[in-house]
Image: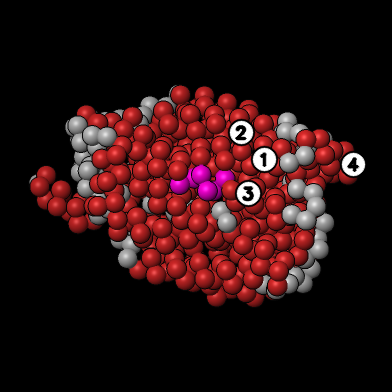
């Protein structure tokens, strides 16, 4: 009941998606991967939706919203370190063990934000403790996302990697939507005073059961068959340090290409998903409830189409999807940001269109990036490239946008920032090799040329 790749060993074949047993295994692997991403992004969704309350609780005075955005951005400083630590470990001992640990750290750190004392109670220690928990989250996330995407890609059938991989990003949006929806529900249920004093804490507690569910799911699925195959063949790196050296010396080109693509991906991502509630409230003057409603409607529309775009990329390729997204955002970001300033209904239309333009990138991350590296450095290559770029550009996007808009009064700056990032992404995309349908087994960089050579040998 298996369907082994023609380019790899049959010792650890991947599940056959056409068999009942294979479908069950794939569902478990997808759920185990996506729940961690959902937990990670649940935190971001809650943090973004409660930004006003967090500002009052932890950053009163001159720092204000900028302090809250700094709290968001600081977690990304530790993401590259997390990538450097967790990535090589995941390539040495396996993806599943690392992912079990990272989801526990993320969920516990998020839940603890809900019990922190405020600035009124302990003074400067309040923001210090918040920053420390954000650091733990960032360090853990440095290993979570790259590992989850790698794990899912190595389980998915080569011809359907886009379709199955898109469910990881469905978890991204699902976590963000859940976080925003919980905050909106509490806003409607509780009085303003209750929400400001203790109600904002409640959403953070929900991260703990999410993490426990994720931990359970990850202990119920076997290690990636692609990793186990290479482990049996004794082709893993001899040590984490040797892996890092090999990554820099041999695979610097995919690292650089991925870095540039992630600049575009995550500037758009964190501008649209993390900064947008603050932008709609502080810059456009919307109420918290109204801003959250705009975000929820747009994100639900994005969730509805993301599996279709993932499956579409299996037929057309990853590069056409990325080209359409980058060009669309570059051309339409300015007019759509202007449109959002014209009122509630226009804000929904503008944000939703921007979100749908972004989806071709988001839907294909898990199919595109893991296929850029061979198995023995895949986790580290993904985690390090992704997190270095995210720390430098993506995670700082809310902070940069807020600082420039506050300092200049130019409300359209987020659109310009997104356009610049898309330009960088387009340059990197020129050098990306198409890997739709290509096998990602083995110790060589996946490519169609390699698959054809292996097929010729087998005949």
Residue on which disc 4 sits: 193
- Mark 2 or mark 1: name the one nearer the start of the chain: 2
Residue on which disc 2 sits: 109
Q: Dot 3: within a 10 Å radius of its alpha carbon, few (fewer than 14), some, or many (20 or more) residues?
A: many
CA separation in Å, label 2 and label 1: 14 Å
- Mark 3 or mark 2: name the one nearer the start of the chain: 3
- Mark 1 or mark 3: name the one nearer the start of the chain: 3
Q: Dot 1: within a 10 Å radius of its alpha carbon, few (fewer than 14), some, or many (20 or more) residues?
A: some
Asked if the residue under mark 3 is in contact with the one under mark 4, i.e. CB atoms within 8 Å, the reply is no
Q: Which of the pair 249/458 is nearer the observer?
A: 249
The region drawn magenta spans 75-80
Please give the name of the residue rendered at 10% of the width and 47% of the height, measured from the top-left corner. 457
Q: Which of the pair 201/39 is nearer the observer?
A: 201
- Mark 4 or mark 3: name the one nearer the start of the chain: 3
Asked if the residue under mark 2 is in contact with the one under mark 4, i.e. CB atoms within 8 Å, the reply is no
Residue on which disc 1 sits: 128
Q: Is residue 455 visible?
A: yes
Q: Is residue 155 visible?
A: no
């Amino acid at each position: 009941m298996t369907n082994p790749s023609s380019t790899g060993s049959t010792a650890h074949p991947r599940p056959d998606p056409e068999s009942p047993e294979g479908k069950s295994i794939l569902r478990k692997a997808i759920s185990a991967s996506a729940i961690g991403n959902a937990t990670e992004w649940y935190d971001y969704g809650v943090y973004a939706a409660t930004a006003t309350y967090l500002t009052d609780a932890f950053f009163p005075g001159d720092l204000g919203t900028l302090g809250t955005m700094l709290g968001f951005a600081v977690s990304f400083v530790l993401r590259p370190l997390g990538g450097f630590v967790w990535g090589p470990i995941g390539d040495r001992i396996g993806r599943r063990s690392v992912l079990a640990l990272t989801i526990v750290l993320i969920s516990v750190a998020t839940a603890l934000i809900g019990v922190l004392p405020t600035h009124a109670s302990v003074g400067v220690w309040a923001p210090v403790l918040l920053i420390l928990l954000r650091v733990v989250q960032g360090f853990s996330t440095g290993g979570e996302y790259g590992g989850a995407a790698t794990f899912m890609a190595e389980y998915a059938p080569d011809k359907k990697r886009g379709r199955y991989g898109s469910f990881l990003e469905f978890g991204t949006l699902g976590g963000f939507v859940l976080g925003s929806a919980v905050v909106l529900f509490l806003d409607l249920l509780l009085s303003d005073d209750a929400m400001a004093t203790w109600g904002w804490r409640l959403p953070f507690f929900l991260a703990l059961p999410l993490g426990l569910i994720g931990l359970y799911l990850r202990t119920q699925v076997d290690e990636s068959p692609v990793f186990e195959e290479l482990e049996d063949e004794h082709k893993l790196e001899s040590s984490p340090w040797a892996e890092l050296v090999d990554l820099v010396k041999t695979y610097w080109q995919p690292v650089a290409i991925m870095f540039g693509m992630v600049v575009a991906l995550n500037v758009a991502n964190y501008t649209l998903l993390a900064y947008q509630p603050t932008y709609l409230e502080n810059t456009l003057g919307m109420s918290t409830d109204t801003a959250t409603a705009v975000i929820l409607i747009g994100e639900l529309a994005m969730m509805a189409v993301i599996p279709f775009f993932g499956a579409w990329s299996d037929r057309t390729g990853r590069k056409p999807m990325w080209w359409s997204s980058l060009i669309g955002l570059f051309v339409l970001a300015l007019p759509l940001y202007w449109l959002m300033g014209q009122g509630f209904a226009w804000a929904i239309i503008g944000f939703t269109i921007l979100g749908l333009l972004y989806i071709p990138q988001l839907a294909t991350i898990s199919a595109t990036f893991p296929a850029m590296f061979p198995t023995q450095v895949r986790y580290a290559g993904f985690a390090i490239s992704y997190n270095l770029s995210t720390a430098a550009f993506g995670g700082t996007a809310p902070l940069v946008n807020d600082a420039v808009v506050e300092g200049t009064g130019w409300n359209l700056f987020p659109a310009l920032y997104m356009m610049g990032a898309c330009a960088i992404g387009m340059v990197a995309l020129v050098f990306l090799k198409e890997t739709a349908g290509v096998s990602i087994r083995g110790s060589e960089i996946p490519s169609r040329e390699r698959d054809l050579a292996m097929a010729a040998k087998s005949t």
